[in-house]
């Protein structure tokens, strides 16, 4: 029983895809996935760009963790989007679907990076944030799972897709990939 979970997790990692529609890249090659994303973050670091991580639930936990790691270990300008005061203010004054997009309207600049983490890929607040970041001419990196036709996966510049419909497996894969990227940036 426990071995089956491990096999599912390994299979999810092996079958995770990087999709970059602009450059016509679709690959399951993990090395290309990591090299591509490390390069994007290194360029942001050199150019003093900001990184915004967003997500809901477990994905919000990953986003907060990565904000800290990218700032502390990667020495990149990572900004938290999860202040309880800001979230409740924006949720109250606008609506929950705007809690990230309103922050990006105020803080994001051209070529900043939005890392949108959404297991289902269909959260309205994530989709709205991506649309706002596009208007700002930012770079969008998505981490999704579940259905192949999820909305978020279609919107990013770089899309990491885990083809399984299990939250734990999808979130663990997202966390592992992001942790690998920060470990590479540290080196």
Image (tube, helix red, strand yellow):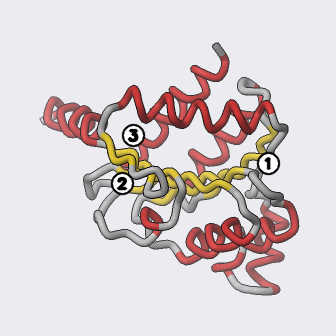
Q: Residues within 10 Å of mark 2 (few under 14, many from 20)?
A: some
Disc sitting over residue 173 in the figure: 3
Q: Earlier in the sequence, mark 3 or mark 2?
A: 2
Q: Earlier in the sequence, mark 3 or mark 1?
A: 1
CA distance separating discs 3 and 2: 10 Å
- Dot 1 corresponds to which residue? 79
Q: Is residue 14 left or right of residue 175?
A: left
Residue pushed farthest top?
187
Tell me the element at label 3.
helix
On the image, the x and y values in percent for residue 137 come to 72, 63
Q: Going 58% across and 21% down the picture, which residue do you hit?
A: 183
Does 146 sit above or below residue 95? above
On the image, the x and y values in percent for residue 159 come to 46, 52
CA distance separating discs 3 and 1: 22 Å
- Dot 2 corresponds to which residue? 167
Q: Is residue 133 left or right of residue 144?
A: right
Q: Residues within 10 Å of mark 1 (few under 14, many from 20)?
A: some
């Amino acid at each position: 029983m426990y071995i089956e979970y491990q096999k599912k997790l390994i299979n999810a990692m092996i079958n995770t895809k990087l999709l970059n529609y602009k450059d016509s890249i679709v690959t399951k090659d993990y090395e290309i996935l990591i090299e591509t994303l490390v390069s994007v973050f290194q360029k942001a670091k050199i150019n003093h760009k900001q990184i915004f991580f967003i997500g809901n639930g477990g994905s919000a936990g990953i986003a907060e963790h990565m904000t800290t790691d990218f700032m502390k270990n990667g020495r990149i300008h990572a900004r938290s989007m999860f202040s309880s005061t800001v979230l409740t203010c924006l949720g109250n004054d606008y609506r929950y679907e705007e809690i990230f997009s309103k922050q990006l309207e105020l803080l994001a600049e051209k070529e900043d990076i939005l890392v949108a983490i959404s297991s289902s890929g269909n959260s309205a607040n994530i989709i709205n944030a991506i649309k706002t970041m596009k208007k700002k001419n930012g770079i969008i990196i998505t981490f999704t799972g579940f259905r192949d036709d999820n909305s978020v996966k279609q919107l990013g510049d770089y899309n990491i897709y885990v083809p399984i419909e299990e939250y734990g497996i999808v979130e663990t894969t997202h966390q592992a990939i992001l942790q690998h990227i920060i470990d590479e940036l540290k080196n």
